Image (spheres, rainbow, N blue to C red):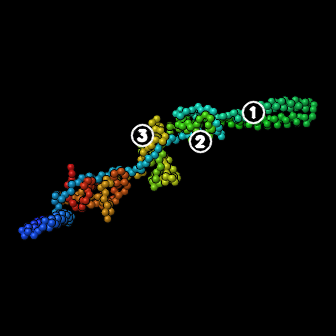
Amino acid sequence: MKLFIQYAFLALITLGFAACGEGAKNGNGALAEKNKKLEALKKQYVQLGIDIKQMETEIAKLDTNAASTDNARLVKIDTVRSEQFVHYIDLQGKVDAENTSYVTPRGMGGQVRAIFVKEGDYVKAGQILLKLDDVIVKQSYLAAKAGLNATRTQLALAKNLYQRQKNLWDQNIGTEIQLLQAKANMEALESNLNSQQENVKAAQEQLNTATVVSNVNGVADEVNIHVGETFTGAPQQGIKIVNKSKLKIVANIPENYLARVSKGVPVEISIPDIGKTYQSNITLVSQTINPQTGGFNVEAKLPGSKELKPNLTAMVRIQDYVKENAIAVPVNTLQTDESGKFVFVAVMEKDKLVARKRNIVVGELYGSNIEVTQGLQAGDVIVTEGYQNLYDGQTLNVAE
């Protein structure tokens, strides 16, 4: 067929030039007419080349046994192996401290008179951080204490009078009403003394609120207050204490992974800024979906380290799927047609390596590999390069 088309093409060109020669002999052919015929011949030449190539392809598809090494496709192949396939959820998270607290006053707060800490200082639980204005509460405390002392003096006198009156009564001197009045006066002062003692304690506690202390050990990460300002404990105008001995990673995961992430799931945490990678496990999965992000938060513990600081960016890889003895192929080898997804495998047929289309069912995809759940088994040989435009049964040459 190929030779027949070539002979026909040569005959057509010969006839064309013969006609042109005849026209020249007669002297009637114009130059424009010759150019026109030449352009027509060129178009016929191009179309014949296309027809020849198409015919060769169709013949090769229909007669695979006649395929020669001249039509073989140069490809690269690889043997399918059974190995572990792992899928990860890749996210961005941040480092956070488990014990981060904003210092607040025990009372209503007040005007700052002195500051005993600066940013970066290490503080201990119970250490004094601020001194607030205590003039009024101190006066209240001193007045309550003075009243308490006066009542104590009155009570001592009342007890003495009662004892004297009782001694007289025991000697049948005086009246019973005098004894009862002395006793009632003493008991009233005792009750008043108890009330005033409680008032003094309350005044003392109120006075103590003017001294602001740390409730935790850690580093004063932020000190956003100055002498003369009013301290209420608000984060934007207060003191932040961070304990770096217990750090964690916090990440937000899309809600479609909710069923695949649980406590104990392995997680790999990379901190690009310090070049460190840590292995951990999920310790907390939030029970609500954040309406702003459409996801849920997870946490995993990190080891204490001087290099790690809260709010560092972290790359988080959460292992949400693992299958032993799985089959996986490069995702770029996967093709799709009307029958579904397929790859080309290389098989030996009559001493020739040929391509065969193999329909497959795929599972999880991670990175450059995709899991194959049906259609391939360990030992199969797939075409990894040169698979484009392959057809079923085409002869293959393997590149070194």
Q: CA distance from mark 2 to mark 3?
A: 31 Å
Q: Nearer the viewer, residue 184 or 288?
A: 288
Q: Mark 2: which secondary structure? A: loop
Residue at 11% x, 66% y is 13
- Residue 170 visible in this rendered orientation of the protein: no
Q: Amino acid at mark 1?
A: Ala
286 with respect to 111 (left or right):
left
Name the image quarter holding residue 271: top left
Q: Mark 1: which secondary structure? A: helix
Q: Nearer the viewer, residue 283 or 378?
A: 283
Q: Position of residue 259 (x, y in %)?
A: 46, 54
Indicate whether 41 appears above or below 218.
below
Q: Position of residue 177 (x, y in %)?
A: 91, 36
Q: Amino acid at mark 3?
A: Asp
Name the front one of labels 2 and 3.
2
Q: Mark 1, residues whose alpha carbon is within 10 Å: few (<14), some, or many (≥20)? A: some
Residue 273 is marked as 3
Residue at 37% x, 52% y is 366
Residue 234 is marked as 2
Q: Mark 3: which secondary structure? A: loop
The mark that comes first in sequence, 3 or 1, is 1
Q: Position of residue 5 (x, y in %)?
A: 13, 66
View extreme (left): residue: 25
Residue at 21% x, 51% y is 399
Q: Amino acid at mark 2?
A: Ala
Q: CA distance from mark 3 to mark 1?
A: 60 Å
Residue at 58% x, 36% y is 225
